[in-house]
Image: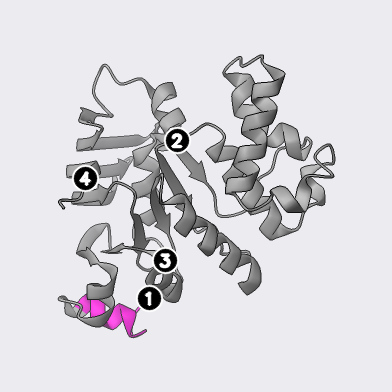
Amino acid sequence: MKEKVKIGFKDMGFWYGSKQILSEVNLKFYSKKITALIGPSGCGKSTLIRCINRMNDLVPTAKIDGRIIYNNEDIYGKNADVIELRKKIGMVFQKPNPFPMSIFENVAYGLRIQNMKDKNEIARIVKKSLEKADLWNEVKDCLSRSAFGLSGGQQQRLCIARTLANDPEVVLLDEPCSSLDPIATAKIEVLLKKIKREKTIIIVTHNMQQAKRISDYSCYLLNGKIIEYSKTENMFTHPKNKLTKDYLDGRFG
């Protein structure tokens, strides 16, 4: 069965002022798959995923050309609705960033912004989102406590629950485990494999073993260009490009 393309980059380039960060990006992200973006620091991985939900719009000097197609529409087209786009494409950052409010209100935050008033429906979605993030059993008796009282790993799963509460189609994660211990990291990895049954996941990671464990596809970037993109198993066992092989073997970056 042919896999469905969820997001497609077509000859995309990106600049901060006069400095080109990404060039000639042609890439497909498949629906309900995990794609890992790998490569050395500064190669453009985080910039690339920030283009997908237009977070780079917040940088005054940012400039983009080419096209990014999501659900058959150019997300940088003149009719694009950025607010709707960000509802459909959620983001989880490198460091857990819970809001200074209760566990419950963290997850309910996006629902309240959308003017949802039904308390029972909000409670239902909060519970469902915490269950999907494998956090419900750990916090169900202390939902009114500050989110800052949770461990780092729990805070990151709370941020994932907060993202899931808005029911996005795509979840972007920018090195979500880089500040976590191996046990907390393993919980996030199990969680992401579950989430991909319903969502398309794109993860930036420096951890080659993580990419190998959880992703269906991998994309190796270097100096703002895609060097290799393939199924993860193929890339890690038979990389086609010597630059990819050197990076995976630890001889670079």
Examine the rendering and report whether any part of residue 217 can be seen.
Answer: yes
Q: Are marks 2 and 1 in contact (CB under 8 Å)?
A: no
Q: Amino acid at mark 2?
A: Pro
In-front residue for pair 163/124: 124
Mark 4 and mark 2: span between their CA atoms? 17 Å
Give the image quarter of residue 119.
Answer: top right
Reading the chain from its start, which is encountered first: label 1 or label 4?
4
x then y, percent, for residue 6: 26, 41
Residue assigned mark 1? 253
Q: Amino acid at mark 4?
A: Lys
Mark 3 and mark 1: span between their CA atoms? 22 Å
In the image, residue 175 lies in the stretch drawn in magenta: no
Mark 1 and mark 4: span between their CA atoms? 33 Å
Reading the chain from its start, which is encountered first: label 4 or label 2?
4
Quadrant occupied by the C terminus:
bottom left
Residue assigned mark 2? 168
For the point 42% across and 58% down, which residue is it?
A: 204
Reading the chain from its start, which is encountered first: label 2 or label 1?
2
Secondary structure category for the residue under label 1: loop
Residue assigned mark 4? 4
Examine the rendering and report whether any part of residue 18 can be seen.
Answer: no
Residue assigned mark 3? 214
Q: Which residues are magenta?
A: 243-253
Mark 3 nearby-residue class (10 Å; few <14, some 14–19, many ≥20): some
Mark 1 nearby-residue class (10 Å; few <14, some 14–19, many ≥20): few
Mark 2 and mark 1: span between their CA atoms? 33 Å
For the point 15% across and 76% down, which residue is it?
A: 240
